[in-house]
Image (tube, rainbow, N blue to C red):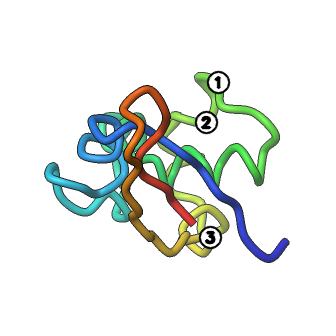
Amino acid sequence: MDHVQVDVFDVAFNIIAGGEEGDKKVVRTKEQADHSLPYLVAVALLDGQVLPAQFAPQRIARADVHGTRPRRRRQGCADRDRPAASLR
């Protein structure tokens, strides 16, 4: 797979994708995992699902999910009803 595009609203970008709330690529706990779009996307691609099992400490610690670090690119959107940020 070459890339994945995830479009989210500005608020979601700021909270879970590394916007105003800071970098979300380092995940060590359930609380960090469920607020990290990079982790959620990576584990969804690897496991085919995002369920409670993906937030277990053993799953969070596995190297495969940490090796799947998406590059982040933000682009604006003039239409406020549409997503305004992307994770690529």
Image coordinates of residue 79 in percent, x first then y, are: 42, 37
Determine whether label 2 and label 3 are within 8 Å by CB. no
The residue that appears at 29% across and 57% down in the rendered structure is 18
Which quarter of the figure has residue 75?
A: bottom left
Q: Quadrant of residue 5?
A: bottom right
Find residue 41 and report its horizontal and vertical position in percent.
61, 49
In the image, taking residue 28 as reference, residue 5 lies left or right, namely: right
Q: Are marks 2 and 1 in contact (CB under 8 Å)?
A: yes
Q: CA distance from mark 2 to mark 3?
A: 15 Å
Point out the tag, 2 or 3, that comes first from the N-terminus. Answer: 2
Q: Helix, strand or loop at disc 1?
A: loop
* Amino acid under disc 3: Thr
Q: Residue, x 14% and y 52% (percent of image)? A: 20
Residue on which disc 3 sits:
68
Task: Identify residue type, mark 1.
Answer: Leu
Indicate the position of residue 66 as horizontal and vertical percent values: 54, 68
- Within 10 angstroms of label 3, few (less than 14), some, or many (20 or more) residues? some
* Nearest the eye: 1 or 64: 1
Where does label 2 land, which residue? 54
Q: Which residue is mark 1?
A: 51
Lower position in the chain sequence, tag 3 or tag 1: 1
